[in-house]
Amino acid sequence: MSVSLMMIWAGCFAAGMALGAFYFTALWQTVRRLPSTASPVRLMLGSLFLRMAVLTAGFYFVMGAHWERLAVALVGFVVMRKILTYRLGPQKAAHAVQ
């Protein structure tokens, strides 16, 4: 395995983490705003479509016709999900609402 391939994979992993941070932070903000919005369905659907559009475009760009890059980016996405779930988990959510 060459150094340049490892650098590409590190970039794909970082891009996956960035996409995960965007996706789950936006989801967290959407859920926090639901009780105070006049139209929760519109907020959820709008947020869903925006998050999915950004995620799909981001993964497509990172992939660049190489499935290995997509796999590495997905690992970064899942790692960020675990990190944010731990940091913003039920313990933090109960204190943030109060």
Image: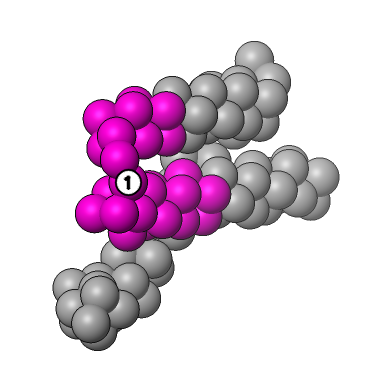
Q: For residue 19, what is the image quadrant?
A: top right
Residue sitting farthest toward the top: 65
* Along the viewing direction, whichever of 12 and 59 lies nearer the viewer: 59
71 sits to left or right of 3: left
Pointer 1 residue = 37
Q: Does residue 52 show up?
A: no
Residue sitting farthest toward the right: 4
Q: Image quadrant for the C terminus?
A: bottom left
Q: Image quadrant for the N terminus?
A: top right
Task: Name the residue rendered at 30%, 65% in the picture.
Answer: 85
Task: Name the residue rendered at 42%, 28% in the picture.
Answer: 46
Q: Position of residue 75 (x, y in %)?
A: 44, 47
* Along the viewing direction, whichever of 57 and 15 lies nearer the viewer: 57
Q: Does residue 85 show up?
A: yes
Q: Position of residue 76 (x, y in %)?
A: 49, 51
Q: Is residue 57 above or below residue 83?
A: above
Task: Name the residue rendered at 39%, 68% in the picture.
Answer: 83
Identify the secondary structure beneath mark 1. loop
Q: Residues within 10 Å of mark 1 (few under 14, many from 20)?
A: few
Task: Name the residue rendered at 18%, 73% in the picture.
Answer: 90
19 sits to left or right of 52: right
Q: Is residue 28 above or below residue 8?
A: below
* Along the viewing direction, whichever of 26 and 62 lies nearer the viewer: 26
Three-letter amino acid code of the residue under disc 1: Thr
Q: Position of residue 38 (x, y in %)?
A: 30, 40
58 sits to left or right of 94: right
Q: Main secondary structure of the magenta part?
A: helix
**Magenta stretch: includes residue 7:** no
Specify start and end residues of the magenta stretch as a single range.
Answer: 20-48
**Magenta stretch: includes residue 21:** yes
Q: Position of residue 84 (x, y in %)?
A: 38, 66
